[in-house]
Image (cartoon, rainbow, N blue to C red):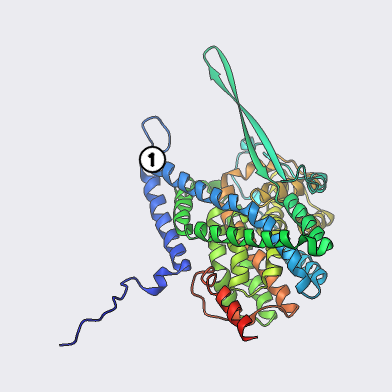
Amino acid sequence: MSAPSATRTSRIPTWAKSFGPQIVAGLILGVVLGLIARSMPDAADGNENWLVGTVATIGSSYVKLLTVAVVPLVFTAIVSSIANLRQVANAARLAVQTLLWFAITAFIAVIIGIVIGLVTQPGSRTGVDATAAKDPSSVGSWWSFLTGLVPNNFFALGSKTSVTTQAAGDGFASTATSSLSFNILQLLVIAAAIGIAALKIGDKAEPFLAFNASLLAIVQKVLWWIIRLAPIGTAALIANAVATYGWDAIGSLGVFTVAIYVGLAIVFFVVYPIIVRAHGLSVRQFFSGVWPATQLGFVSRSSIGTLPLTERVTERNLGVPREYASFAVPLGATTKMDGCAAIYPAIAAIFVAQFYGVSLTFTDYLLIIVVSVIGSAATAGTTGATVMLTLTLSTLGLPLAGVGLLLAVEPIVDMGRTAVNVTGQALVPTIVAKREGILDEERYNAPRNGDPFSDDEVEPTAAKEAQLSS
């Protein structure tokens, strides 16, 4: 009779402990919870039932946690990356190549969007009621984009006040609600200015740069804790989406919704793999590396909220140097949106033109391309599609009320749009790094363990050993 083993083996399979499978499990659980919540009756007071309220609160709280961490991450990462770009050859060339590939992929995506719009004719094959159109809550313009680059204050902080009026007794009562928000583009400008100034000062700035590097390491550790909660956040977000929207919202906008997802699928499954393969990289390794961020982007519907994870997988899984990734990914989160700024506005503009009986000329289609390629920087990481569509419609002279026609399916198409956005934001730095010969291909081709933060504790030890051996 053999002696019992001294070590106890875990009954949980290794793959189940990985981040990727946990996200998938969260998606499946979210769908189940969403279907259950959708089948439950509303509360006695007419409000949503307790399960819908619970998943909505958990999901929105998780996105808030991610968004709160974005500001210190972007600032410290940009300052650190500019300071470290002195260690990377041809830093200016890297920046130019990044912007160039942003434009190239946006150009391809908008062409696909226009072709799909012309083939499917979504505006002439809809039963949506024109009286249901509402004015857009936010409007994009070229002038607003240019003036928006100038920081309002050192923290790039802005406020917004909304007033709601309700009947009270014999009259009406007004309630004002104020909220604070950060302009990420302005934050990029501020951080870049401080980083460049620190380089110009030289040795006197070393204590500040050392402090910034320490703060960045602390922020990244906190982010690791937040992102480890992603399976829970994913389950809540997808459950809320299923319970709130289901398939009913598609209704008369079915052709438009399908057209959007066909365009997104072509970019995601055809264009991106071709670009990856053309640069001699494994398509399978790219998608397995970026997948955690793609999934989180799908359920969170926020490029900015997903930014911390996008940057991490770009660096840890895809092998892009930290000095470059911490510059390119935050920039991409605000300006690189193939879903929101290319596919969607192209098809949506054609929809609005067809719905209102306006014939688009060849010049109009050229304007759509120009706006999508150049104007994507006028979008924001959380409401980019609405701003971008209003910018496109105003450029073409189409009624902005057309935006309101598409509100019914906005959350549904936004999930797919954001997933493509996030994937593209990781693709471009990877391709540029490969073209410039700075991509760590050994890391890119390494087996995935499902956790983009797994080597956080390993790197310091490895660096110390390398220092001792030198």
> Relative to 194, does residue 53 appear above or below in the rendering?
above
Q: How many marks?
A: 1
Q: Position of residue 336 (x, y in %)?
A: 71, 60
> Relative to 33, does residue 99 appear above or below in the rendering?
below
Q: Position of residue 63 (x, y in %)?
A: 54, 50
Q: Residue at x 74, y 52 (%)?
A: 185
Judged from the image, the secondary structure of the residue bearing numbered disc 1 is helix
Foreground pick, 94 / 32:
94
Q: Would you say 290 lies left or right of 183 here?
A: left
Foreground pick, 393 / 425:
425
Dot 1 corresponds to which residue?
50
Q: Position of residue 282 (x, y in %)?
A: 61, 80
Residue type at the position of mark 1 = Trp
Q: Residue at x 58, y 81 (%)?
A: 465
Foreground pick, 209 / 52:
209
- Indicate the quadrant where residue 429 lies: bottom right
Q: Residue furthest bottom?
A: 1
Label 1: how many Cα within 10 Å (few below 14, some 14–19, many 20+) = some
Name the image quarter holding the N terminus.
Answer: bottom left
> Relative to 444, does residue 373 appear above or below in the rendering?
above
Q: Would you say 153 lies left or right of 51 here?
A: right
Name the image quarter holding the C terminus.
Answer: bottom right
> Relative to 24, does residue 393 appear above or below in the rendering?
above
Is residue 366 something one can see in this rendering?
yes
Q: Residue furthest left?
A: 1
Q: Residue at x 53, y 17 (%)?
A: 168
Foreground pick, 437 / 464:
464
Q: Position of residue 128 (x, y in %)?
A: 60, 42
Is residue 109 something one can see in this rendering?
no
